[in-house]
Image (cartoon, helix red, strand yellow):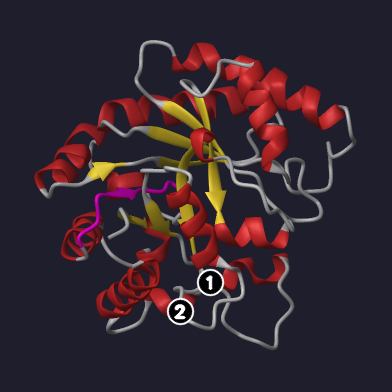
Amino acid sequence: MVARALNQKTARHLSWAGFLDLAQSLGCVGVEPRNDLGRPVFDGIAPAEAGRMARDRGLRLLGLSEVYPFNDWNGDRANEVRELIETAHAAGAETVSLIPRVDGQGTQDGVRQQVLRETMRAILPLLDGTDVVALVEPIGFAASSLKHKAELVAAIDAVGGPEKFKLVHDTFQHAIAGETEIFAPHTGIVHISGISDPQVPLDETQDPHRVLVDARDRCGTIGQIAAFRAAGYAGAFSFECTEPSLAAAPRLAGEIRRSFEYIEACMA
C-alpha cells in the first residue's frame, strides 16, 4: 500500500473538518492544506487548533501551500514566505510550498540559477527556529523559470542542503517537462494526477484538468511511482487534482479510493 495523501485542491469544496474526515476515511497518512482556495486557510480556524483537528484523526499536516511566485523576490514576497512559515509552524505542518514564476521572465540561462540560489539563501533565516522544510516545485511549462529538477537539486545542495529544502515531484509537471530522472533523496512529497483524455495535447493547457489516475493516464504516473518506490522513497503520494467537476462529484470518496486501489494493484 502506498502512503496515501490528499491535497486540499482535490476536494476544495469541503470544509476543513469535512476535508479531514474524507482523508481519514480514505486511509491517508496526511493532508496538504492550501491558502489559495478563495477563503481563509483552515477556514479561519486558528492554526494550532486546525493542526490538532488533523492529529486527532491520525493525520499529519504534510505541508502548507503556497507562495507564488517565490523567486520574484522582494519585501512583499519575504513577508508572504515568513507568514506561511509561521502559520505552518503554529499548525505543526512539516513543510511549506514555494512555486516559481511562470510568466516567461527570469528564464535566461545563468540568470535563473543565480536568482534561485539568492532567493533560497534569503529564505534560510526565515526557517530558523522551526522544524519547517521549504518545498520548491519545478513547473514544466515553457514559460517557467524553474523547469527541471536537476537544476533545483544543484541549488539545494549549494544552499542549505536537503535538511532545509526539498523538491515537490509532480507527475504531470514531470511528464510535460519531458524529464526522465527522479531525485528521490531530495523529494519531500510526490503529487499525483492524471490526464486521461486521449484527444488533448499533453501540455500546460491541461493543468486545470488533471484528474484521478486510471488505466488511461497519459502522464506515466504509475511508472513514476514505481521508480520512487524502487529508489527507496518512503514519503507520501498526494492527489492534487484540478478538474472542477471532480471536486463536485457526488461520490468523490469512492472515486478517490478506487484510484488509490488501482495504483496499489499496479504496484503489487
Which segment did they paint magenta?
27-36
Quadrant in the rendering for residue 255: bottom left
Marks 1 and 2: in contact by CB < 8 Å?
Answer: yes
Which residue is denoted by mark 1 in the rendering?
194
Mark 2 / mark 1, whichever is N-terminal: 1
State which quarter of the image contains the N terminus: bottom left
Q: Hey, what amino acid is under mark 2?
A: Asp
Q: Secondary structure at mark 2?
A: loop
Q: Is residue 3 left or right of residue 69?
A: left
Which secondary structure, mark 1?
A: loop
Above or below: residue 95 compared with residue 4: above
Q: From the image, which quarter does the C terminus lie in?
A: bottom left
Q: Position of residue 130 (x, y in %)?
A: 35, 17
Kind of residue sitting beneath label 1: Gly
Q: Residues within 10 Å of mark 1 (few under 14, many from 20)?
A: many
Q: Residue at point 78% right, 48% down?
A: 103
Find disc 2 in the rendering and name its residue.
214
- Residue 185 x, y percent position in the rendering: 50, 34
